[in-house]
Amino acid sequence: MRVASDGPLPGHGRRWLWGATRVVLWLLVGALLMLLPMLAVGVRAAPPVLDLASEPLTAACRPASAGGARVAGASLLVAAPAVASAASTPPATSAGDLFGATLDAADCGGHFERFALPAPGLALPPSAVALWDAGALLTGGAGRAPSPEPDARKVYTAIVQADGKLAGVPFSWLAMSDAQRALLDRPPHAVAADGLGERRVAYLRGERGDEAALFRHRTSILGDSINSSPVLVGPPSGNSLDADYLAFRERHKSRRPVIYLGANDGMLHAFAAGNGSELYAYVPDALMPALNRLPDPGYVHRAYVDGPASSGDALIAGNWRTVLVSAMGGGAQGLFALDITDPEALDEHAVLWEFTDRDDPMMGNITTLPHVIKVRTSRGAGAATYRYFAIVSSGLNNYVRDGHLSSAGKGALFLLALDKVRDAPWRLNVNYFRLVTPISDPSMANGLSAPALIADRDGALNYAYAGDLQGNLWRFDFSSWPGAAAKALFVARDGDGNRQPIAQQPMVAYASGGGYLILFGTGRLFDRSDLAAASFSTQSFYAIHDSLSVPMDAVTGRSQLTERVLAASGGDLLSIGGGTMEAGSKGWYVDFLQSARTGERSIGGGRLVGGAIVFNTLLPGADKCDASRSRSYVLQALSGLPGGLSTASVAPAAPIVGVLQSTYSAAPSLVQQLASHGPPDPTGQVVVEKGYAVVNASAHETAVVGSVKVRLRSGRLSWREVANWRELHEAVK
């Protein structure tokens, strides 16, 4: 229809135009209504960001009493004679050592001490005197010079290029790059340089001349260690029969025991276990943008090298080496690897690589353990080929808007080649690999936790199991590498169908009838709000059977599991019961007693020994600023019942089920007490009975929860020849 532009419209024309306009308007409104949900999804595409606390969340956060207080941080209990070859060893009657980190509440100063545990009780008296304090050694005191002196410390860093190429250098003003010096030459939150960069570096190395003048005062040069994990590395202890490995082990059989510990002074430290002297320290390049905050008089505590670490032996470029892999926790998104084969010669060449969200945006804050693992890279017609990797989950907050975000919030399992040449860039599917796990609910925080690893008879990775914060338990099948993929074996939900977060590394036991039993607890603790009663919900412990059938036989829910029920038993104990596991049961589960009211949860993993699963839970205080406590459990892995495995110290006639502890310990330690051979059974099988003390350790404190006795098969298991044993073994791996 043609409309004249030089006169008024006739009546029917005006009515037609108004009708057409209304239709167009309604179409626009309808389209907008259809777009709104899509726009809303786009806005919330990234899950909620977690506020990762750098303070010790399980300690009380109320003001300390007069005189200041030390707050417990990372700890490690080792049974004798793990460091017997070192100088300054404890008395011959010692049952082992407790290495504990503490934080000075007043100024965030750190201490790391070694205590000798008395035998046979293992209970450390309150008056126990430390054999050494690494913080005191570094700081010095009245009439005692720092050891080593700040200028003599072996502190190193790396100059890392945008593509991952790096070169190790001393952590000194002249050795660092222009970009690193620029970051340290300005105060926090400033753009302009102030010319104090060289003095900041001296401060970070331990020089104290500018304290209380230009920079903040410290009572200890050593930073605190809250969420990091002490790693004791002695002589090589792998069981490979490879001739080259046996020669490597022989060469380093006298290697001195060293403890590696990340701290919130921006460094990973290597301390001689015998006398506490610092042998080496590494400052990750990834932390350079935040190092200028440490000397600032207005310093507010934050995380630096505040993640867990582990070590392992690896074949790199044809040579056996010992490698340490350390996460940075809340300090930075990523991890680094060091060659620690010879602790006497650690220098700028020790750093192998750093890998951060700059190298791959799916990398997040890693708060659970990385591992060193051997992977079969080809099966070919001839001999298989292998390669050694650091394997690590993507962790938390990889979707945070920091310039390197993965907006979808998916998780990933990373394999980072330990043989990456320092001067080579990171390249996906060349020297690192990534297996992605989908996100289930974009409205919930997400993050993949550390995997439990299963090796085949050659020591190569076969399966990995990892959980995420949305309750998914993922299985990664590496038997067909490089075609491995993530598959959801189970989703943890409470009785009302709510997803339960998995924030710990699972454990794996052999299941009767074949396959594996995957054991894990649920719950999370990342900031103070997780301790508030408003955040409490039902949390549980699960044992999920993976039959290894093809295709995978996923466990669809609680209806396929056998329930276990906890009940109050009087005093500081609980009891647990439940019916017989029927044929076809896919495992078992137990809800922690009234956890929606008490806040009880499982966040720290546990120990497996001889068919027993030993773990602790966390119980928040009455207020989120009160100190947390623990409950300790010892259950049969296969049934979820006590099974006569343990006796509790508080009630020798009762098993260890929910034994209440006055302080929190992430995971119990097992200290072997006795071992004896029993008579052969009717089939001729020899049985060894081993006894362990269950000990909770934290900084200056140990508590013996009770004991565990397990029976293990020993010697020749059968006289019957099984001609196809290899095929049978492969079938049940």
Image (cartoon, rainbow, N blue to C red):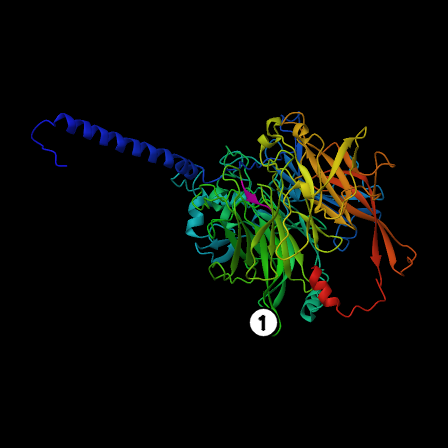
Q: Quadrant of residue 696?
A: top right
| Residue 604 visible in rendering | no
Percent across and percent down for residue 9 are 12, 28
Q: Horizontally, is 56 left or right of 512 in the view?
A: left
Q: Residues within 10 Å of mark 1 (few under 14, many from 20)?
A: few
Q: Quadrant of the C terminus?
A: bottom right
Q: Horizontally, is 114 left or right of 427 in the view?
A: right
Give SS at disc 1: loop
Check disc 1 and give the amino acid type. Gly
> Looking at this view, is 356 or 144 the one in front?
356
**Helix, strand or loop: magenta stretch:** loop
Percent across and percent down for residue 318 are 60, 69
Q: Quadrant of residue 494?
A: top right
Percent across and percent down for residue 83 are 75, 52
Q: Is residue 500 above or below residue 277?
A: above
Percent across and percent down for residue 324 are 61, 55
Q: Quadrant of residue 119?
A: top right
Q: Is residue 424 above or below residue 267?
A: below
Q: Residue pushed farthest bottom?
A: 382
Q: Quadrant of the N terminus?
A: top left
Q: Is residue 250 above or below residue 409?
A: below
* Residues shaded magenta: 446-450
Q: Residue pushed farthest front?
A: 12
Is residue 730 found inside the magenta-colored segment of the image?
A: no
Q: Residue pushed farthest left?
A: 6
| Residue 663 visible in rendering | yes
Q: From the image, tell me which residue sits under label 1.
A: 380
